[in-house]
Image: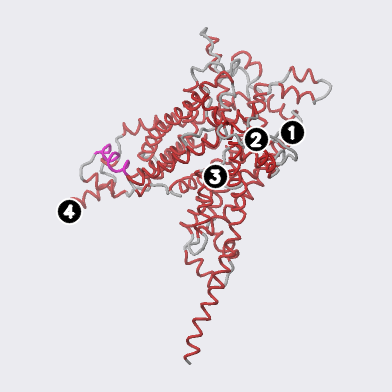
Amino acid sequence: MTTIQSALPQRSRKLSSITARKKTFWLTTMMLPGAIWLLLIRYLPMFGIVIAFKNYRAFRPNTFWNNIIKSEWVGLKNFEFLKSPDTGVMIRNTLGYNVLWIILGLIISVAFAIMMSELSSRFLAKGYQTLMFFPYFLSWVVASYFVLAFLDPTSGMIPFFQKTSGLKVTNFYHDTTWWPLILTICNLWKNLGYSSVLYLAAITGIDTTQYEAAAVDGATKWQQIWHVTLPGIRPMIVILLIMNIGKIFNADFGLFYNVPQNSGSLYPVTQVVDTYVYRAYANTHNLGMSSAAGFLQSAVGLVCIVSANALVRRIDPESSLF
Amino acid sequence: MTVINQSARKKIKAGSFSLNRFGPGTQAVFHVVLALFSLICIIPFIFVIIIAFSSEESIRQVGYSFTPLSWSTQAFTYTFKLGDALWRSYFNSFLITIIGTALSVTMTVLYAYPLFRRDYKHRGFFNFLSFFTMIFGGGLVPTFVICKSVLGLSDNYAALIVPMLFSPFNVIIMRTFLQTTVPNELIEAATIDGSGEYSTLVRIVLPVVKPGIATIALLVSLSYWNEWFLSLLYLNKNMDIMPLQYLLMRMQRNADFLAKNSAMLGADASKAIAQLPSQSLKMALVVFIVVPIACAYPFFQRYVIAGLTIGSVKG
């Protein structure tokens, strides 16, 4: 009797450990396609960063591993591009546009979200949301044709208007004056709908009894926005800010490459880190230098996102990203 | 005190408490601002449609205009004569989008499901494996070199599909969908019934998370449809497989592209080039790219908005 009693749980424990192992095995097989992709397409290139410290060139047999082993080590020589004046311009552009767009985007999209949430007509609010979200689904190639329709030197709407009304015709694709404005408009045009909808979702999640309580206490609608809505969406604002600060050295390649038609005379105002890296590779095939620039970009991005997150964690642990 | 509160509450619920809404004047201002921006968002597309239907003569005389002198469907009839290039790239776009979406959705669901299972042993490890790639990467050039010379992604369909197959961001969206829609008891019950892991996933979990799968499928298919950067990187010689976006992008650079293709028209080639509605034709191609999105947009935007708002809330 006693032996049976003690043997039973033991047996079931053994059984359950087998089923547990089986479960782990089958669940792990599900991870494999994604994990293999990550290892090959995301982690393997991290070792490729070695290119940034080598004079990478082709040897015989011309395979990647052979080339990388035989190429000589040059230390920080590939990073000498940092001394050139072009580098300052590209860093200024990347940071400048990003900082400006983070601030503008935040203010305008929060304002739009609040406006949409306060409309009494649900139908119209949905309609605005639908229309505003539309550009988010178009590529920069398509958007560049939209811009072309307005700016094309021969038939574009604005140059043609200048021509017919006797004004001086602006050659937009050679004149840098207007591009900071044009790029800003394009960026807001494409992304405002998306970020407004994110904030709108956060506003909808706020407990409505808070508004009622505030109203009962005599708060006007503007005071309610300030004391209820804005604190309510603060976590969302903080999360999006961290993500944007983490990407402060990244630029939207399509916006800076396609919209200005890759025009060389516009480089002083359109060259950003991503286009610089691409052009360094595409025009001069300088793999070492473009890898070095890309590596710096990734490293600085990592530092930015980790420190932004650490800062937030200290101020408000609830809102931190990780 | 409590009595006043309750009566006030009732008033608010009845809608008679004006404090909880902005006045009609403020609302009108909101409407004007939002309507104006909404208009700005779609007007470029409408403009491009108008240009595509403008006659070449009108474009010569008044430029690109919202009110062309005369209308014409010449650009569209011409696309049918443009030869294989256009239709082949249209076909390529569809092919890449369909295959890419099918593979990507499968991989995403398979990766997100074990991460959602709290009783999965290696959850933490695989979670980190995908999360880390969101904050650090090898950069453009090392990725390109590895993909091209080690993995053989060059001048083939795989090069236009594989580099975008998987996205940690989509995994987070899918995992959040699973967490919010699939109760743990459902899986426990299935396990007690002796259901294997794969059959639990396919027969019990998938039917419940259909909206989540629809969201991922739409996001992925949009990014494949809009893709041109991979073509820019990986296509050097084999231009037969280029998607429509890249065709459009190259057309902007090579003004002679149209002339070259019309040369294939045959005997009266020079005459064809002379009559080429090149300006409106480009815009007609833009319309070709956007129309599938614009048509499907009213149906899918609900799913996509749901997915994006969920995914962004927290990793």
Marks 1 and 4 belong to one chain: yes
> Residue tagged by mark 1?
B237
Marks 3 and 4 belong to one chain: yes
* B309 versus B45 height, above or below: below
User: Counting other residues with Cα less than 10 Å from the Cα at mark 3, is it few (<14), some (14-19), or many (20 or more)?
Assistant: some
The x and y percentages for residue A145 are: 59, 26
Q: Report, in whole angstroms, how far the alpha carbon at label 1 lies from the one at label 4.
A: 80 Å
User: Counting other residues with Cα less than 10 Å from the Cα at mark 1, is it few (<14), some (14-19), or many (20 or more)?
Assistant: few
Q: Are marks 3 and 4 in contact (CB under 8 Å)?
A: no
Boundaries of the magenta span? A220-231
Q: Amino acid at mark 4?
A: Val
Residue at x-position 24% and y-position 44%: A215
- State the mark number for residue A256: none
The chain holding disc 3 is B
> Residue tagged by mark 3?
B300
Residue B37 seen by the camera = yes
In the image, taking residue B251 as reference, residue A31 lies left or right, namely left
Q: Report, in whole angstroms, how far the alpha carbon at label 3 lies from the one at label 1.
A: 36 Å
Q: Amino acid at mark 2?
A: Tyr
> Residue tagged by mark 4?
B3
Marks 2 and 3 belong to one chain: no
Q: Report, in whole angstroms, how far the alpha carbon at label 2 lies from the one at label 1.
A: 24 Å
Q: Report, in whole angstroms, how far the alpha carbon at label 3 lies from the one at label 4.
A: 48 Å
> Residue tagged by mark 2?
A56
Q: Report, in whole angstroms, how far the alpha carbon at label 2 lies from the one at label 4.
A: 80 Å
* Mark in front: 3 vs 1: 1
Q: Residue furthest bottom?
A: A1
* Mark in front: 2 vs 4: 2
Applied colour scheme: secondary structure
The x and y percentages for residue B267 are: 84, 21
